[in-house]
Image (cartoon, rainbow, N blue to C red):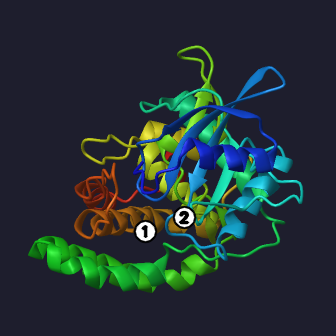
Amino acid sequence: MAVFTDVSTEQAQALLDTLALGELQALKGITAGIENTNYFVTTVRGGESHEYVLTIFERLSFEQLPFYLELMRHLARKGVPVPAPQPDAQDRILHTIAGKPAAVVDKLRGGHQLAPDQFHCEQVGAGLARMHLAGQDFPLHQDNLRGLPWWRETVPLVLPHLAPDQAALLQAELAFQEQLAPSAAALPRGPIHADLFRDNVMFDGLPGREMLSGFFDFYFAGVDSFLFDLCVCLNDWCIDLDSGRLDEQRATAFVKAYESVRPLSGAEHRLLPGLLRAAALRFWISRLWDFHLPREASLLKPHDPTHFERVLRERIAKPWHALESLP
């Protein structure tokens, strides 16, 4: 991720003191992602080492952040493996560092699985469904800030940077999603992660038998259809990264595992091909925005937007219906 805000050891220790998390031993900037500033934090407390992640929020405001942080606390209390935000003595989990909103959360065990097989996809599918069910009684509301209204605002900003065929595709797909939106709005809804890519999931254990240890980076979360969240996952966990082509074996395993916890409705199955396109469009737009309209950052590495252009073209050319693949 990009490091937008430099944090000194003195600033970090002051926050750790407020949270009673011990003495700072190490502070290391994380160089993956492009939305917030993140640091790995190692402390010593009671003679034992503890690991956390410090996040300084660069786009989200003090007013918006309670939804995300309280959602993480809600899910953690329900047994969903997510990083728990650390409270101060007044039980506040939103803090300030360098004049910006900040949070400190538990660091999950293990590492990423960037070449997932069916076994990994099954675990993430079932875990995603459990997360959806656990969030149904979450009392706060925040719209998915990267949903259709944001697409409408952002597409005109990136169009001047595109070749004619790309611009035509982007405009045509936005029009298609406008038509689909009323049907999608009627699907089962609740808090979703909205960005559960391979690098936002952790596994722990022996190679080949790694077990899911948690989901993290909830800072794109919002209330939207559960199906959209599932489609975001399918477009990352179950594809050939070079071509964007869907791996139907992995996709079928993912959906089957999800449905073992929360069965999809008939309407969700019917709209799955369209929302796979919506999920691809969302990330194509955001990557175009980050690539062509970047912000300054000391370690900014925007993702290649053409990846999700390929994914979108694949989803249009070859619609996938899970019901046709499920046994």
Residue 183 falls in which quadrant of the image? Answer: bottom right
Q: CA distance from mark 2 to mark 1?
A: 8 Å
Q: In front: 184, or 44?
A: 44
> Residue 308: where, in percent of width, then height?
31, 57
Q: Secondary structure at mark 2?
A: helix
Mark 1: secondary structure: helix
Q: Let me know if residue 217 appears in the view.
A: no
Residue type at mark 1 is Ala
For image coordinates 58% across by 63% down, the residue present is 227
Residue drawn at point x = 34 percent, y = 57 percent: 297
Q: Estimate how packed mark 2 is, as few (under 14), some (14 to 19) or many (20 or more) residues with alpha carbons within 10 Å.
A: many
Per the image, the residue denoted by label 1 is 278
Q: Residue 201 appears in which quarter of the rendering?
A: top right
- Are dots 2 and 1 in contact, CB under 8 Å? yes
Residue drawn at point x = 58 percent, y = 65 percent: 100
| Above or below: residue 210 compared with residue 88 | above
Residue that carries the numbered disc 2 in the rendered image: 228
Q: Residue at x 39, y 40 (%)?
A: 247
Residue 45, image x, y percentages:
79, 28
Q: Of callouts 2 and 1, which one flags the residue occurring earlier in the amino acid sequence?
A: 2
Q: Residues within 10 Å of mark 1 (few under 14, many from 20)?
A: many
Q: Amino acid at mark 2?
A: Phe
Query: Residue 321: image x %, image y %?
Result: 47, 56
Q: How many marks?
A: 2
Q: Which residue extends farthest top?
A: 206
